[in-house]
Amino acid sequence: MASAPSTTASTLAPSLRSPFSSTPRGARLPATIRLSPAQPASAGCRVGPGRRLPCPRARVRCAAAVKFVAQSEFPAEVLESDLPVLVDFVADWCGPCRLIAPVVDWASGEYAGRLKIVKIDHDTNPQLIEEYKVYGLPTLILFKNGQEVPGSRTEGAMTKDKFKQYLEPLLATTVA
């Protein structure tokens, strides 16, 4: 009886072989895989010794309804608001902040009229970060009548379902 042919990396045609399949751990990759000095890794953050181009930064995107608020606007937008205000402390460099951004955008439309949502940029508002003792990002805090709602502070990214489980009980107690 003939045995079935083996399809290991060594028997595949060279064009079908992965450069990683037969490379021992710690070995250098073939030149076709490595980036050449003319192709910087992050679209040009470093050009050469001592020269820098602006690095493209991923911005924590938000819908038109979610507004970034600076420290000077914080009292009027958050503390003096008639509606409860959910404050989302974020940073451009924060991966979990980018993960939760679509959920926060969704919530701004879903809870319109019942809740106001604003974002605070961590890097440009260090006094707010210190005042509200924000130690992790993203941090969500609900404010009602100019005060932080007890038990409303949460850190980290969450799914839409978890976000609803977090927010619904808080809104039920603050609206009544």
Image (spheres, grey):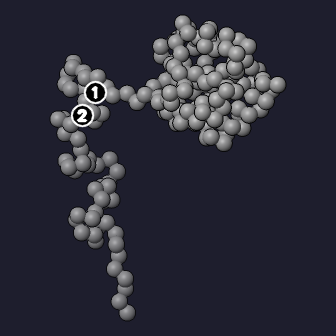
Q: How many residues crowd mark 2 within 10 Å: few (<14), some (14–19), many (20+)? A: few
Residue at 24%, 48% (x, y): give it.
Answer: 33
Q: Tag 1's secondary structure? A: loop
What percent of the width, then of the height, locates residue 65? 54, 27
Q: Let me know if residue 101 appears in the view.
A: yes
Query: In the displayed structure, does residue 82 sit left or right of residue 137?
Result: right
Point out the image quarter for the N terminus.
bottom left
- Evaluate if marks 2 and 1 touch, with contact meaning CB atoms under 8 Å apart: yes
What percent of the width, then of the height, locates residue 144? 73, 17
Closest to the observer, 82 or 125? 82
- The residue carrying mark 1 is 45
Closest to the observer, 70 or 159? 70
- The residue carrying mark 2 is 40
- Three-letter code for the amino acid on which mark 2 is drawn: Pro
In the displayed orientation, state which residue is furthest to the right: 176
Quadrant of the image occupied by residue 157 = top right
Query: In the displayed structure, does residue 64 sit left or right of residue 143?
Result: left
Q: Tag 2's secondary structure? A: loop
What percent of the width, then of the height, locates residue 150? 76, 20
Closest to the observer, 3 or 24? 3
Residue at 34%, 72% (x, y): give it.
Answer: 7
Query: In the displayed structure, does residue 32 sit left or right of residue 63?
Result: left
- Establish if 49 lies above or below 130: below
